[in-house]
Image: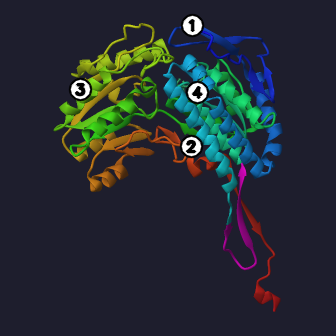
Amino acid sequence: MDASTPSFRAQCFINGAWVNADSGATLAVNNPATGEIIGHVPDMGANETRRAIEAAAAAFPLWRDTPVAQRAQILRRMGQLMLEEQERLARIMTIEQGKPLAESRGEIAYGASYFDWFADESRRIYGDIIPGPADRRLFVIQQPIGVVGAITPWNFPNAMLARKMAAALAAGCTMVAKPSELTPFSALELADLATRAGVPAGVFNIVTTNDAAVVGGELTHHPLVRKITFTGSTAVGRLLLEQASEHIQKCSMELGGNAPLIVFEDADLDRAVAGAMATKYRNAGQVCIAANRFLAHASIADKFAEKLAAASAALKVGDGLKDGVAIGPLISPAAVEKVERHIADAVAHGARLLSGGARHALGGTFFQPTVLTNVSADSLICHEETFGPVAPIMTFQTEEEALRLANATPFGLASYFYSTDIARVFRVAERLETGMVGVNETAISTAIAPFGGVKYSGLGREGSRYGVEEYLEKKYICLGGMKSSDDMK
Ligand code: ADP
């Protein structure tokens, strides 16, 4: 590591203090680009998690009752601090996660935008007055749900936590967060920035662990935790939902995807290729809304595939800290094995390799950007999230067939299509079974719009004015004994 290597926080943050695991145990974190161990964080368990929950519960009344203008100011300051520290935070992210530095910078700005957005939303947590019988007045107020348990993944180590934290704190909730064991350092930085922004002790706590099941178990089995917010795999989401049933915790789940990208015969082909490149290779394809399957109309499929293969082959693979690198390493050897399995299975089902298809000469977990054509809908790659730099192209003849193929999955996070026919744009957008649809655009994530899925892709929405609702309870207040004006005569 050179002189520009940032330092890494080696402790967890509970009740306003930096602490070690009770046992002193730690877990090692590595740089996926080099395999080098970059530092250690505490390997905590149930006891530390319980203490964090109790601290969050103790801090809740103070934070709930903090004047909303003050809460908004703290959240806005948090976003500003992230931008002030963008370069340092981006380097930490690239070193622990692998993504190119330009993408890390973008993620920090994206994460900061949630604090800015929810700072404003915190001021708009309105209630209702319901017209009722003459002798009553009916009101609805919205109140923070309480302590939130947040579990986040490694692919966006800052933004996946920032968008939960910003919304929860805006609502007046307190939080115990468990980041991925693969990328804890970016999350720990958020605790430091929160303190500097003025977030009181106990309001935001972070527990790192090598045993996610133990910490997740404590968060879901503790009656003081009233809400679980999770981003990760459908399998773990399902488990957490089961566990959360014990104390009827409210749940938000951002789970796996299997996004189709459809290119219709009337598409602007160059725009479709540019959009495909952006969604497929960002973060080496390790994105839940990355296009996983490409469906091209038979009349333009060859042309689309050729252009995509040429653009893919031109991408530079390497260490994300190096200039000009567009694709970093995959997160782990297991991730590479899954990509290889998907390619081998697609080829066994008749697919043709147009570019890439193998590990990169750099070794480690670097993989070549890959384009496959003539892919069969029966291939594994069409049914499982690949989470790697592989673009499998299928063909279709009619709009009906495209929709049938696109919807032939239990997942429903994002979908994309390219068309210049305005009637088709509405028809197809309305029939795609996903929570988000990008039309002639794949860069759809923003703090101001609702992010979330349907079917196996999850429950609830993050970002936008809907995002804060996930952390609120509605309370109906019935005021009786009111006299109508007739009674007063
Ligand atoms: P991915 O496949 O993207 O790593 P996971 O769902 O395995 O997705 O991981 C997402 C997050 O869930 C990580 O923070 C991980 O540590 C956590 N996690 C994994 N297993 C469990 C579990 N049994 N209970 C709670 N959290 C878990």
Disc number placed over residue 462 in the picture, else none: 2
90 horizontally vs 305: left or right = right
Q: Tag 4 or tag 1, which sits nearer the N-term?
A: 1
271 horizontally vs 214: left or right = left
Helix, strand, or loop for circle 4? loop
Choose top left, top right, bottom left or bottom right for residue 126. bottom right
The answer for how far apart the CA atoms under marks 3 and 2 are is 35 Å
Q: Which residue is located at x 70 percent, y 16 percent?
A: 43
Q: Tag 2 or tag 3, which sits nearer the N-term?
A: 3
Q: How is the image coloured?
A: rainbow
The answer for how far apart the CA atoms under marks 1 and 3 are is 37 Å
* Residue 5: x %, y % from top left: 62, 14
Q: Residues within 10 Å of mark 3 (few under 14, many from 20)?
A: many
Does the magenta-highlighted stretch encompass residue 70?
A: no
Determine which residue is flagged by label 1: 36
Q: Residues within 10 Å of mark 2 (few under 14, many from 20)?
A: many
Question: What secondary structure do most residues of the magenta stretch adopt?
Answer: strand
Name the residue nearer the viewer: 453 or 426: 426
Q: Tag 2 or tag 4, which sits nearer the N-term?
A: 4
* Residue 244: x %, y % from top left: 64, 36
Helix, strand, or loop for circle 3? strand
Quadrant of picture, ligand 1? top right
* Residue 83: x %, y % from top left: 62, 34
Determine which residue is flagged by label 4: 157
Name the residue nearer the viewer: 254 or 12: 12
The answer for how far apart the CA atoms under marks 1 and 4 are is 19 Å
Determine which residue is flagged by label 3: 373
Q: Amino acid at mark 4?
A: Pro
